Image (cartoon, rainbow, N blue to C red):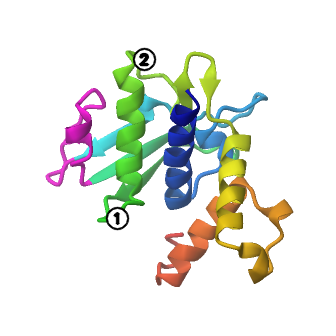
Amino acid sequence: QNWKKVKATTELTNTAFCCLLQEEEYTKGTKATRTVSFRVEDVTFWRQDGTPIPNTAPLEQLTQAHSVTLFLDNQKNGERGATILHTACQSWFCPVQALARRVSTIMSTGMAQRTPLSYVTPGTYVRAQNVTDLVKLAARATNLVAQGYDLKRVGTHSLRASGAMALKLQGTADTTI
């Protein structure tokens, strides 16, 4: 079961970085918040021709998606109904592929479309601390301390901040970020 949680944590961490997500949007919280965590039903995979691929499709079909959208039912700032779009990329770090694996894993267990993406097994979910532990492990493995980073300041928000910086360094417009 531990490897399932590590796999789910990795997939959600990838998605959080690439889509600039807040921890409440992709992990199981311990307190009530206004933000609704992404569920399987909030993820839509799209073919090149603009037609959707059902979330119930086999993994092989989901991984052929040209893009994916994430529907935000409610956010911390009170905004309702926002949508995030990400196009597939030819990389092992592709968020479309990560979401395809996450959705396929959940659907293959017979869970409902309303199941949170943080679901691992009954009673087990990816929590913010799991993501923080993974990010800190990566920071140690890449020796970020030698670059002046304080590991006490590394956490889930680091994904959102570093994802935004990666976009800026690639020349993405500030208004897009």
Count the labels in the image: 2
Boundaries of the magenta span = 47-66
Tags 1 and 2 in contact by the CB under 8 Å rule? no
Q: Quadrant of residue 150?
A: bottom right
Side of 86 relative to 160 (left or right): left
Give the spatial CA distance, label 1 vs label 2. 29 Å
Residue 54 belongs to the span the image colors magenta: yes
Is tag 1's residue or tag 2's residue first in the polypeptide sequence? 1
Residue, x 36% and y 51% (percent of image)?
A: 96
Residue, x 30% and y 43% (percent of image)?
A: 45
Side of 42 relative to 16 (left or right): left
Instruction: Residue 105: give x, y in percent of width and height.
Output: 39, 30
Residue 34 belongs to the span the image colors magenta: no
**Label 2, on which residue?**
111
Q: Secondary structure at mark 1?
A: loop
- Label 1: how many Cα within 10 Å (few below 14, some 14–19, many 20+): few
